[in-house]
């Protein structure tokens, strides 16, 4: 039974994963090689949870309890030696992850389950340096950013683990309020990112062709497909519209839509110009530095509103 959890990496994803499990009542060890990163993560988690409480997603009492559930480590052995479940959220570098899992195989108790937050690297390669016994207790458990608000978790079931282990891990995610997606094949991007990239490819193509301005592209998505997708998946949408209609429209449109196998030239140009989005102050839109915190809070408040509303349509 999973009771103590270790999260490796205190950055964007790691700190969010740690706070979600802490809110759910688990004892969490948060590890990072940088003491400064750990200190920053502690401050960020307090701010994020307080914001959640101010918006009535959790209580202020829960914030205090969750913070007490988290311990900070910059010694890997101390962080993982008594953990029942370890999830890493380190940079997407195969050699780094292979060596990390080799260490974990040696440092963790035999019953410990190891997981990676990756959505792009194959599990089979990440397991290359671990024992055969440990391979039966390793998974991909992919979160969406921001981890503390996005309710999805993609869990691998690639044939190396048993149904029992899968259910054991799935149970802690469900207790933490996540909707779990069972991913049956080890493919790049898993499920949600592949769907998202399909949408993004056409959005960037529409911009590249000058079909619509950025504001109108966003409006078309938010108040068109995404408006339905907030509550209903693509397959139900297709069933409701009629599969014959979807088949005809697919024949008419797919041949003239973007099918390139690399990133959009428009996107690449933005990157080359240093226009990386909010973190650089400009992307497709402008983000004045003095407004960034307010804009992020506005975005997160929308997610909280959706999260509250989602309780009414989760089946």
Image (cartoon, rainbow, N blue to C red):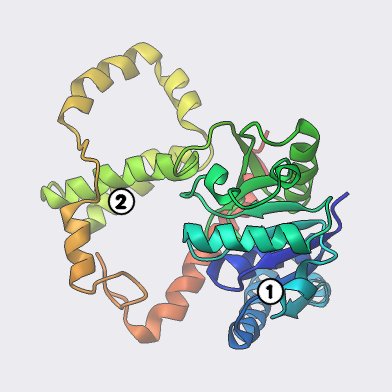
Reading the image, the residue beneath label 1 is 31
Give the camera-side residue of 66 and 210: 66
**Image quarter (top left, top right, bottom left or bottom right) of the C terminus:** top right
Q: Position of residue 123 (x, y in %)?
A: 56, 45
Q: CA distance from mark 1 to mark 2?
A: 41 Å
Mark 1 or 2, closer to the camera: 1
Compared across the picture, whether 209 is left or right of 19 comes to: left
Task: Give residue 71's position: percent from left, percent from top.
Answer: 78, 77
Q: Which mark is residue 219?
A: 2
Q: For mark 2, does the 10 Å Cα neighbourhood hold few (<14), some (14 to 19), or many (20 or more) residues?
A: few
* Position of 281 relative to 199 (above/below): below
Q: Nearer the viewer, residue 161 or 28?
A: 161
Is residue 152 left or right of 287 when viewed as pictured?
A: right
Q: Earlier in the sequence, mark 1 or mark 2?
A: 1
Do the CB atoms of the residues marked 1 and 2 lie less than 8 Å apart? no
Disc 2 element: helix
Is any part of residue 240 visible from this angle?
A: yes
């Amino acid at each position: 039974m999973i009771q103590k959890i270790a999260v490796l990496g205190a950055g964007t994803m790691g700190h969010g994963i740690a706070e979600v499990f802490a809110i759910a009542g688990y004892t969490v060890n948060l590890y990072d090689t940088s003491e400064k990163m750990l200190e920053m993560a502690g401050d960020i988690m307090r701010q994020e949870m307080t914001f959640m409480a101010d918006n009535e997603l959790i209580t202020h009492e829960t914030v205090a309890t969750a913070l007490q559930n988290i311990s900070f480590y910059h010694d890997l052995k101390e962080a993982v030696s008594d953990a029942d479940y370890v999830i890493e959220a380190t940079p997407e570098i195969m050699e780094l992850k292979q060596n990390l899992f080799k260490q974990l195989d040696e440092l963790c108790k035999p019953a410990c389950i190891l997981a990676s937050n990756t959505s792009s690297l194959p599990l089979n390669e990440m397991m290359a340096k671990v024992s055969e016994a440990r391979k039966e207790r390793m998974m991909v458990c992919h979160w969406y950013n921001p981890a503390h608000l996005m309710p999805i978790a993609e869990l691998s079931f690639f044939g190396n683990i048993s149904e029992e282990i899968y259910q054991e891990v799935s149970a802690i995610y469900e207790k933490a309020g996540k909707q779990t997606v069972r991913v049956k094949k080890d493919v790049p991007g898993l499920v949600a990112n592949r769907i998202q990239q399909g949408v993004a490819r056409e959005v960037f193509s529409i911009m590249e062709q000058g079909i619509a301005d950025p504001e109108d592209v966003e409006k078309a998505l938010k108040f068109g497909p995404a408006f339905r997708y907030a509550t209903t998946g693509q397959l139900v949408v297709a069933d409701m519209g009629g599969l014959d209609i979807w088949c005809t429209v697919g024949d008419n449109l797919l041949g003239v839509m973007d099918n390139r196998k690399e990133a959009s030239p428009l996107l690449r140009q933005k990157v080359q110009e240093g226009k990386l989005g909010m973190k650089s102050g400009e992307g497709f839109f402008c983000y004045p530095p003095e407004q960034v915190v307010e804009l992020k809070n506005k975005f997160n408040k929308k997610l909280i509103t959706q999260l509250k509303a989602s309780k009414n349509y989760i089946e």
